[in-house]
Amino acid sequence: MRLITSAALLALFGFAAVASSQPAEIPVEEVFEPDEGPDAPPQFLLKTKFLESENTYPPIIYNTQSTNLEITLQNEEDSEAIVQVAGGALFEIGNDTAIENITAVRVGPLAVAPHTTQTVGYNFVLDREPKDYFLRVGLLIEYEGQLVQYLGYNSTITVQDPPLSYFDPQMIFLYIILSGIFGVGGYFVYNNYVKSYLTPKKTSGKKRAKSATPVTPSNTTAETTGTDTKGYDESWIPEHHLRSKSPKPKMTKKTKKNTK
């Protein structure tokens, strides 16, 4: 068996068929009905399953999300078949030119024994305008030294934007960013505009009265004039005047007791 490089296999993989101008009514799973005779191509049966849209036709593909396929190959020949590459192409409905070649991926060599079945996993991501498109997905199979391309899906798909999910990591990150912005903005508005209206203003000119101890007039006079309690300063008055003014002690008369 000859060896074929990955680059050569990917270069050989392509879709030359023309896209149908009308959407198919049902998915095309049995993509090849071989002619009888010695020149008939190998009898392989391919079926494709869209794992996220199994029971929907046309299958729904969400933008920016991985679309996972299972391509099943049934080998009806008496010789071994080897699956090498999986890939596809996207078309506008009614247009024979591919608008996007879906990434071809080397999935082999995967040997499929005679009269047995093997399943190949394949996934891709689209980011297109939401509407219907025509999709071709297939396998590049090596059989008896020759490479043959077989289609596993050849029909319509519907591309849609993904539904919003509140628990999506991107949405959660967006919530955190928005919460931070609104939090900072709210604090700024409150601190600069709202707080001044809510805080009661202090009345100016009214001071709390200080407690004062009562002061007698005599104490006050003595402190301010530097005099004693008499009301005047005696230091400059001559001493003999002070003596004359000093009160004389009162004399009490003694009475004689009568003795008998």
Image (cartoon, helix red, strand yellow):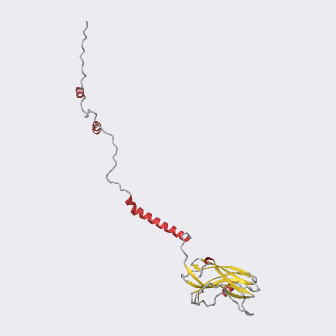
Q: Quadrant of the C terminus?
A: top left
Instruction: Judge by depth and name the residue closer to the eye, 203 or 75.
Output: 75
Residue 24 x, y percent position in the rendering: 60, 86
Q: Quadrant of residue 194?
A: bottom left
Q: Is residue 89 left or right of residue 200?
A: right
| Residue 168: x %, y % from top left | 56, 70
Instruction: Indicate whether 42 appears above or below 260.
Output: below
Who is closer to the viewer here, 193 or 248?
193
Q: Quadrant of residue 16?
A: bottom right
Left or right, residue 238 beside residue 199: left
- The percent coordinates of residue 23 (x first, y second) are 58, 87
Question: Residue shown at 70%/88% (left/top)?
Answer: 148
Please provide percent x and percent y for residue 97: 59, 89
Q: Quadrant of the N terminus?
A: bottom right
Quarter location, residue 84: bottom right
Give the number of callouts.
Answer: 0
On the picture, is 113 further left or further right than 105?
right
Would you place residue 168 above or below residue 241 in this image? Answer: below
Front in this rendered view, residue 212 or 10? 10
